[in-house]
Amino acid sequence: MFAALHRHPFAVEAFFRHSLVLTFAYPEELLRELLPSCLRVDAYEGQGFLAIALVQTESLRPAGWPAWTGRDFFLSGYRIFCRYRRQDGRELRGLRILRSYTDRRAMAWSGNLFTRYNYHHCRVASHRDEGRLSYAITTAGAEADLSVAVRLDQAATAPPAGSPFPDLAVARRFAGPLPFTFGYEDATRTMVIVQGVRQHWKPMPVQVESLRCGFLERAPFTQAPLRLANAFLIERIPYRWKRGEVERVPEAAP
C-alpha cells in the first residue's frame, strides 16, 4: 500500500511565481553512477548536467481543487538530466530527482508520502528588487546550504564563462524543467513516470553574480571542478503534474 502512495497517485497543479534554475556540467560518467541502469545521462559533448531549481510555488493542490485549498511554499530540487526508453520503444527526456528541500515541514511530510523526491526541511531568506534576486538557504548540518544572487536588470547574452554550450539556443535545451520526471523503485524494478504540463514558457537567461552550493561541495561532485553551464529565470507559470504512470523495467534493461 505504501509503495502505491509513493507513486504520485493523483494529479497536482500549482502556480510558479518564479523559478530560478542553475545548471552545472559534469563528466557524463560521474553522473551515470548516480542513475539506475535503466536511465542514461542526457549528455552534450561528453558532459552531463545537474540542475538546481529554486521555486516560489503558490496554491499547490490536487488537480481540480479550488486555488484557495492550495499551499504556498519554497521548493528547491537537485536533479539530473536523463533519458528513459519505454517498453514500447519511445524515448523520453526528463529528470531524475536526487533530493528536494522545502521551507514547510508539512510539505516535506506530504512530499515524502506521495513521491520519492526525498524532501528535507530548510530555512530560506530571499530578497528581490528591480535589479537583483538573491537566496540564502540553510539546511541541517549545512549539507545543502546555498547562496546565490543573479541580476535581473539585464538579461545574459551568452552562457556563463566556461559553459560547454556554444550559445543560448543550445543552453535552453537544458534549462528545465523537462516534460517528464522519473522515479525508480529498485526493489520492484518499477519506473514511475510523471509528466508535467506547462504554459507560457519563456526562460530568461540571467547573469549570476555570486554562488556557493554546499551540496556540490560533497562527494562525488568534488571529483570535478564546479562548472556553471547556464542560468535561467521563468516567471508566472501555471503548472500541472499528471498522475504517475507505472511501468515495469525488465531484468535485461540496458
Image: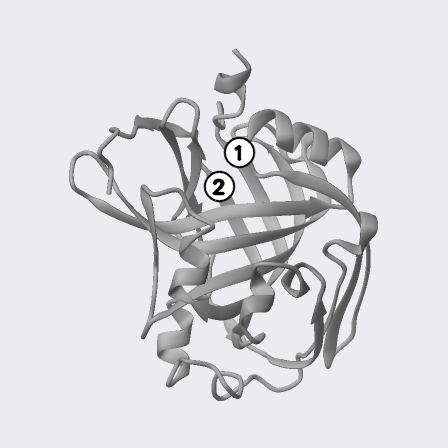
Instruction: Name the spot of residue 66 as percent of width and height, x first.
Output: 62, 30
User: Which of the pair 242/224 is nearer the observer?
Assistant: 224
Q: Categorize mark 1 by other alpha carbons within 10 Å: few (<14), some (14-19), many (20+).
A: some
Closer to the camera in the image, 111 or 45: 45
Q: Is residue 52 toward the left or the right of residue 32 in the image?
A: right
When the figure is inspected, residue 186 is found, relative to residue 102, above or below; the finding is above
Q: Position of residue 211 (x, y in %)?
A: 70, 74
Using the image as rendered, state which of residue 32 and residue 8 is in the foreground: 32
Quadrant (top left, top right, bottom left, bottom right) of the C terminus: top left
Residue on which the image places disc 2: 240
Q: Residues within 10 Å of mark 2 (few under 14, many from 20)?
A: many
Which image quadrant for residue 120? top right
Give the image location of residue 99, x and y in percent: 61, 46
Q: Is residue 201 visible?
A: no
- Residue 148 in sight here: yes
Q: Taking 40 as reference, is 104 left or right?
A: right
Relative to 182, is 205 above or below? Answer: below
Q: Quadrant of residue 212?
A: bottom right
**What residue is shown at x 57% (from left), y 39% (from top)?**
117
Whether residue 234 sits left or right of residue 110 in the image: it is: left
Q: Is residue 168 above or below residue 52?
A: below
Residue at image position (66%, 84%) is 153
Q: Residue at x 34, y 43 (%)?
A: 37
Q: Are marks 1 and 2 in contact (CB under 8 Å)?
A: yes
Viewer-proximal residue among 80 and 102: 80
